[in-house]
Amino acid sequence: MANKKGRRRDFGSVRQLPSGRWQVRYRDPETGQLRPAENTYPTKTDAQVALTHIESDITRGQWSDPDAGAVNFEEYATAWLRDRKLADRTRERNESVMRLHILPTFGAGSVADVTTARVRSWRGKLLAAGVGEPTVVKAYQLLRALMNTAVDDELIRRNPCRIKGADRYDVPERPVLTVAEVFAVADSIAPRYRLLVLLAAFTTLRFGELAALRRRDIDLEVLTVTVRRAQAELQDGRLFDKAPKSAAGVRSVSFPAELLDAVTHHLEHFAAPGREGHVFVGPQGGQLRRSNFRDDWVKARKAAGVTTELHFHDLRHTGNTLASTAGASTRELMTRMGHSSSRAALIYQHMTSDRDRAIADRLGAMIREGGGEATD
């Protein structure tokens, strides 16, 4: 800006320090007070060029307070996590990742101290220390989300988390069982868990969804299982039911008629009483826990002679593959599995019950062809 005589307003100045280097002083656009620039310069010319750049940034509205990012990282991260709207289990996981993998490196410094070079070094050290790649990816995603907020809060200009590919990892191909192998595992496990294995494979419900099922969720006339909630377990052992992550998670899934006898037998002998009774409970009648079920699963898997790499969740992958083989379309598979699409419209698109029945009938035919016996 110029005054009436055409002279430039006193924006700032440069001066030589006792050390011989040159310091830039400029007027803070918010306070109007002169403040020193972050760096000093070897020559007067360099300092004058720097002053010109600072003035240009302020004029274009691109200047940011270099002291803004001086806020302590741990304090900022703690407040950020506290203010986020998260499910209890998600909050617990995020707090654990923050505490174990992010704060030890960045917590003592400031938000502005987090640079791309430091992020790259931090990620490499986690991987070198043997931290699992899925955990490292989760830590990176969490740090990136935090720093995005720091950008929005104008504490920093750019998000330093700019490492290509660091936000994802290649999931190894999971094993797919044959129908005969599914029944081999089901017949090798404790009788109270036999139906758990069969429904996981032939309805593709998740463990948490199966554990949360109540008697009223199973319709023996139309042969469907309705998912209304999913069980979650906190690190302190508390169990609670929560709503599915998306609208697509609430769904009714048809099961093959060939499983009807197994379903009826289980309800008569193993399920908790009453409409609200859990379909699957432990030997003492308590709620089914993933940690307690694991030993039974491992024993059954070994007894059936199935690969030791098989996880219970792989039954869901098996069921998805079998349903695809039975002729399910992509949209039908998504609905059956409770998946939300990147295309939000697909969340609200549901296949007809007739088509779902047809898929279940085809699965039933595959059971018969595979030699599986659904009854006890």
Image: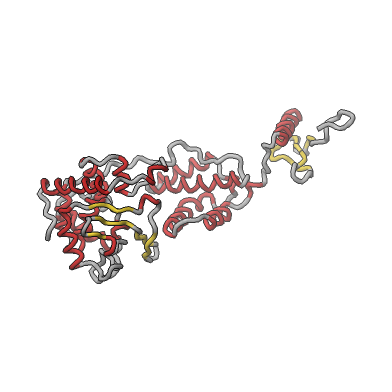
Residue positioned 60% across, 52% down in the render? 72
**Above or below: residue 62 compared with residue 231:** above
Closer-to-camera residue (340/361):
361
Residue positioned 46% across, 51% down in the render? 101
**Above or below: residue 267 compared with residue 310:** below
Closer-to-camera residue (324/154):
324
* Horizontal arrangement in the rendering, residue 91 relative to residue 376 (left or right): right
Number of labelled discs? Answer: 0
The C terminus lies in which quarter of the figure?
Answer: bottom left
**Above or below: residue 331 compared with residue 225:** above
* Horizontal arrangement in the rendering, residue 99 relative to residue 28 (left or right): left
In the rendering, at what x and y percent does residue 105 appear? 51, 50
Quarter of image, res 167: top left
The N terminus lies in which quarter of the figure?
Answer: top right
In the rendering, at what x and y percent does residue 140 appear? 46, 45
Q: Can residue 297 be seen in this view?
A: no
Closer-to-camera residue (194/13):
194
Closer-to-camera residue (342/102):
342
**Above or below: residue 129 compared with residue 271:** above
In the rendering, at what x and y percent does residue 213 appear? 29, 61
Q: Which residue lies furthest to the right in this view?
A: 5
Quarter of image, res 124: top left
* Horizontal arrangement in the rendering, residue 161 relative to residue 31 (left or right): left
Residue positioned 29% across, 44% down in the render? 333
